[in-house]
Amino acid sequence: MLMVAPKCYKCGGVGQVYQAHTGRVLCKKCFEEDIVERVREQIKKYNMIESGDLVLMGISGGKDSFVLLDVLSKLHNPSNLIALTIVEGVTGYNRRIEIERTEEHCMERGVKYITTSFKEEIGYSLEELVSQASRKGVKESPCTFCGVLRRRILNTMARRVGANKTATAHNLDDESQTLLVNVLRGDYNRFFRIHPMSPRLHEMLVRRIRPLRKIYEWETALYAYFNGFGFQAYECPYITLRPTLRAKLRRFLYAYEEKKPGSLMRMMDVYDSLLDKKRPWGDLGELPTCIKCGEPTSYGRDICKVCEIIEKITGV
Amino acid sequence: MLMVAPKCYKCGGVGQVYQAHTGRVLCKKCFEEDIVERVREQIKKYNMIESGDLVLMGISGGKDSFVLLDVLSKLHNPSNLIALTIVEGVTGYNRRIEIERTEEHCMERGVKYITTSFKEEIGYSLEELVSQASRKGVKESPCTFCGVLRRRILNTMARRVGANKTATAHNLDDESQTLLVNVLRGDYNRFFRIHPMSPRLHEMLVRRIRPLRKIYEWETALYAYFNGFGFQAYECPYITLRPTLRAKLRRFLYAYEEKKPGSLMRMMDVYDSLLDKKRPWGDLGELPTCIKCGEPTSYGRDICKVCEIIEKITGV
């Protein structure tokens, strides 16, 4: 039997990647270019980054954030990019390897790198918060604390360093899960807010961008792998093991995507085309301001989630 | 331990139904009224039926179609309603019991009842089509044939009897599954077309209404049960047993609804509120006309699916 290696549909070179959602085979180089070009298109289409922008990137040290760092440094002046790693503060999970690695990636690309921690910013490490929470019978999971604090710190740090945009590495799989969760929750507000053109809802809120929103997770993984990015050494000990509703949703979407490649992309395309032109967020009011810390909070609240967590746990 | 029966939140009577999506308990009578009122609201909101309308209802004989028949006869002049059962023509599945039962239900309510069959309308029974199809290696499933023919016959029969609306018994579960399938397919057109206000796309296409679109399937089942509706005696022998993608979707949505009651309702609410005001179907063109039979067909086709099926199978 004669075996012929499939050719890259773009350059005719040796095919290495089968992109199921387009039905095309690509070589390594053209695959990487495809990712960069698709990020460029999103940035341009939604005016995510303009030439003078100072962009603070949330870099956890995982594969997605590596791709964010690498691609943005190709598309924007690296001296106008800052990478930020936020250390949660959990014994046995000190992020040392991720930080060393990210430092190296940033140096190679001429990107400024800063780190901070929950302890420095909020006064408590994640571990301290979690152990206090279990003592006080607070029901929120460590992942809730972590998500809330991480978003807060990315935003306050952006203001501190004078960045006018924050970038996170959410990929297409993340975005489509979130979209569906928001629809099933009937959360109109959040449904609109994941759109790249949705307006800033508070003057203290730095505009957030998600340049990888149309890149599949398998694509970020492969891009990172092709670029010699090592796999993560340790996993957070708080990682949730019970199958949450979101995990069910993820599994369902994966199964669907596997049988009908391109489904997640098409779902986001429908969403985009619905909101690109119509932009029905005229009636989203400004977010309220926390009466304790002065940061923006969610609709209907007067104390923000961060102050609430600290109050519940420390009684302060 | 003292046990107190829960009270109906409306009338204070003995509670019999727990409506998870509202968190309320209802008695049998108030539950039935709730269903009727919610159908009335949908009809009014979307102008589904006006006073002089002649409505042809597709009545399979199952629980949903029983609810359609019962509720519509309470909300519209029964003499302006016609029920239609279409017999597929499958050995051992002759619909005799369903037809007898529907005849009785129609008589009780003063609704005209007619029946027809694939054989009378198309020239072939479903069984004949299926056996020809397997001989000719046609890949479509019996359910595809059945769906296509059923929709066609409902529409042509409506024109024949002078009805200006056709009503089907699709419930909230059906609608939310279809919505999600259309989104995952990226099928903008069908995405818009399940909205009750989407325009007629062909002059030969009678306007379709789905008055039960906001009633959960468990609600139609319970309503039918409370009204003495017997369970279906026989199942179609062609019922698909392998777990299709749609079955996966259904299971996922059920699991989600069970954990977070009201999710399907909220999903349809988001859909409605997106399209109610904006109605972005300005650019949906008229459907093409089949060059063989003169009936409307899908975009990009010149021969309709019905003619295609008959052509493939009979070579005519």
Image: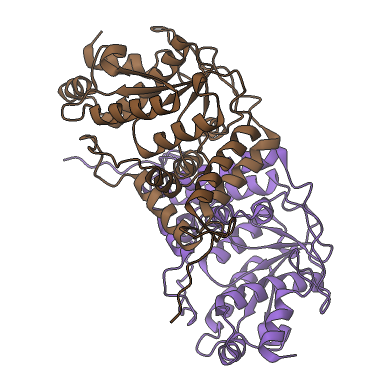
Chain colours: A brown, B purple
Residue found at x 56% / y 17%: A286
Q: Nearer the viewer, residue B99 or A201?
A: A201
Judge whether A180 appears above or below B124 on screen. Answer: above
Residue at (34% x, 25% y) in the render = A103
- Camera-side residue: B193 or B81? B193
Counting the numbered discs, the total is: 0
A15 on left or right of B304: left
Q: Residue A106 falls in which quadrant of the image?
A: top left
The residue depicted at 46 percent of the width and 21 percent of the height is: A298
Q: Say if A54 sits above or below B89 in the image.
A: above
Determine whether, in the image, residue A216 is placed left or right of residue A38: left
B204 on left or right of A161 = right
Give x and y (percent) for residue A149. Answer: 34, 21
Quarter occupied by residue B131: bottom right
Q: Quadrant of the C terminus of chain B?
A: bottom right
Foreground residue among A109 and A57: A109
Could you tell me residue A266's position as x and y percent? 58, 51
Name the image quarter holding the N terminus of chain B: top left
Q: Which x, y percent locates residue B151?
A: 68, 70
- x%, y% of residue A176? 49, 44
Compared to residue A305, the image places residue B159 above or below, namely below
Is residue B222 visible in this depiction of the protein?
A: no
- A315 relative to A57 in the view: left or right: left
Residue B139 can be seen, yes or no:
yes
